[in-house]
Amino acid sequence: MHHHDSPNNIHTDNVPVVLIGNPNVGKSVIFGALTGRHVIIANYPGTTVEFTQGTFNLNGKSRSVIDTPGIHSIVPFSDDERVTRDILFSNKSSTIIQVADTKNLRRGLLISLELAEVALPFILTLNMADEAKIRGIKVDIDKLSSILGIPVVSTVATSGEGIQTLVHAMDTARTSTYKITYSDEIEEAITQLETYLPQTTLSRRSMALMILVNPSDLLGHKTFKDVDHTAIYNLCRDTKEKIGHPLPYSINRQRLKVVDDILKNVVQHSSSRRFFLEEFGYWTVHPVAGWAILSVMLYVLYLFVGVLGAGTLVDLLEVQLFENIVNPWLTWGVETLIPIKFIQDFLVGDYGMFTMAITYSLAIVLPIVGTFFFAFSILEDSGYLPRLAVMLNRAFQWIGLNGKAVLPMILGLGCTTMATVTTRILETRKERLQVTLLLALGVPCSAQLGVMLGMIADLGTTATVIWGSVVMSTLLAVGYLANQVIPGQKSDFIFELPPMRVPSLSNILMKTLVRLEWYLKEVIPIFVLGTAILFILDKISLLYFIEQALAPLITGWLNLPIEVTGAFLIGFLRRDYGAAGLFALSRDGLMSPLQILVSLVVITLFMPCVANVLMIVKEYGVKFAIAVAAFVFPFAIVVGGLLNLVLRYFNIM
Amino acid sequence: MNCPLCGYEFKVETMACHDGCPMGSRCNLICCPNCGYQVVDESKSWFSNFLHDMFPFLKKTKPPQRKQKRDSKGELLIPLTHVAVGKMVEVSDMDELTSHRLTKLSVFGFVPGSQVEVLQHRPSPIIRIDQTELTLSKEILDQIWVYV
């Protein structure tokens, strides 16, 4: 699934162009504009965040270009930032395009100054010139270019404006002539450090500064195996004591002073108009209006995915197309062509490849995940999701996490397995384990959520509220307990909010299609496998024995029809497949509303799918994965049974 | 303060019940040590703070005991938590922050001398520095001192 490529051995026939810049400045859009989306995706070893490589045409010659994850500084403080630094180290005399947000030039220049110190040739691209204009920010590009001694280009990547200029400027990339002089203590430390350091592609001065900022990181790199670590650490400690402040902070502070001086010369502010989206962004995090917007958003999501996707579209596809036309025809065809009963059953029987695996995946889950992916892409591109972190920070603090953990949890609604990977954005191991557990326990993935929304749509409001509150309170309670049990500490809540933007339709459609492609490629084989297992279990009558063995649990404790056993069994492979099984049962009228509700709660809290378990093993080891499984599975059954008892006792539903 | 019932004068800070009692950290009542009469401590009430933030006109008087200090030149400083929404202020002193937090904030261009604007305090504080919007915990905001 993952390619472990290091930038040394990726296929390159020339010196690559590397795109570098802060997060959210449009690097990937520029990458797309340059390459026309001919993208090879590679996973960087040991990190979640991948760098992307492609090629573009420069004066008739093909040239490769690398898109890197956003950074705040060349000196990494987290795994994803390390990717960029390592690329700088490994590509000899590469050309760097620094992409900066024109309206946020202050932070962009902080990186420019570092690149100047590194002494690699680069170009500065001031992107999002249109947004800066709206905000009344005008940058004197020629002046900035002459101050830094490098080419500076202004672009609006989304509309392609300035991309040609950027391509033409590519060959004129130069090393910057700008040099900062730091305070005496730091300059002294730099001079001493330089004597310890080996020759690399980066300047000694920049490496010395990187070491002062984060010694353990750079010295951990293989290039510095042989240098005198003790002497360097002592030097850093002494310098820090002399200055009395943490070094990264004082170095950044001195750089910012320089940046502010440059900005005074090149940036002009005029009156800006506050436009609608900015205003709307504030309302989404308003203590009262924010909740209203969240509820409206959830309701629209429900209408779109639950009613349109799981209702109308599934009806059209499953009932009208598959049950009435496709499956009868297939059954007829198979029965006339293949006279062997066993193969007939395998293809079109109760647990048949066409009648179960293909019908479930194409007619039930596909329209639901399709609508969900579409809606989710809109939310993702609009910048709304990070604002949820603001709204939910308090609730998350109560369970020992902070708002930052909202992101993996929400992404879990897309795919729990991928969300387990993104727990890496959390800073402490404790937080990562906690979120991984909660994801595995009670965050349904898009396919599962969609199927369940479809079932809930038939049940009515009371059931929806009960289901929602049972799942929510379970997550809160388990989160609270996990916070007490899992050792470790919590991290600081400092988190950048990207601006709200109108998502572009083409981008959303592209994302939706790519995700659907992933779904078809990865999920259908699992559905086929699950169906095959059920088919075999059924043929050798093992399914009957399993049903009998589990009967006390399923029909006794949970009070569900025995047919549910099959759905739960394939739920071990994928929860959405299990949910699709329940969906089919409830459509056939085999379950009462109360039974549907109980089965929904159980399948929501059920075991995470196989892929997720494997991902947990990969990220956090077998022991933790077993612990999660050993907790989640019985817990789901217990909660479902208790819900059944309570609802029956109070005669609700 | 003076007890409104018996008039007994006492200092709230010296009362042990808020530190000694396991419920103390959430307790928003002040009991007179003389007669036991309970006075409501509005500044500690989540609900009252919430209402006041939502509807600023409800505020009759400024809440008592606001944090403030003076810098070496004698200028008055207050923590960012006390800055009104929409006001642009200059950061003076961030020394109370841990080095990890200092570093993290400095890469966003957040250092002494920076101009920052508080966009909201609830549900989580959001501050703007230049064109960057950051959300951070109240606890951190409380350790950042700005010029009034």
Image: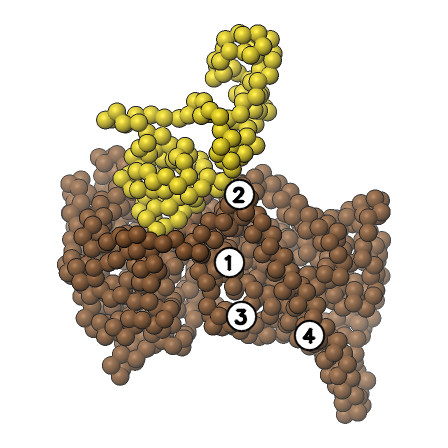
Q: Earlier in the sequence, mark 1 or mark 4?
A: 4
Q: Tell me the element at label 3.
A: helix
Amino acid type at circle 4 is: Ala
Please give the letter of the chain rendered in yellow: B
**Spatial separation of the CA atoms under disc 1 and disc 4:** 29 Å
Mark 2 sits on what residue? A287
Amino acid type at circle 2 is: Pro
Residue A168 on image: x %, y %: 23, 75
Tell me the crowding category of disc 4: few under 14, some 14 to 19, or many 20 or more residues within 10 angstroms, Cα based.
many
User: Looking at this view, is A216 or B28 the one in front?
Assistant: B28
**Spatial separation of the CA atoms under disc 4 and disc 2:** 41 Å
**Which chain letter matches label 2?**
A
Q: Earlier in the sequence, mark 4 or mark 3?
A: 4
Viewer-nearest of discs 4 and 2: 2
Q: How is the image coloured?
A: by chain
Q: Earlier in the sequence, mark 3 or mark 2?
A: 2
In which image quadrant can residue A100 be found? bottom left
Q: Which mark is residue A512?
A: 3
What residue is rendered at 32% in x and 58% in y?
A132
Label 1 and label 3 in one chain: yes
- Check contact, mark 4 vs mark 3: CB within 8 A: no
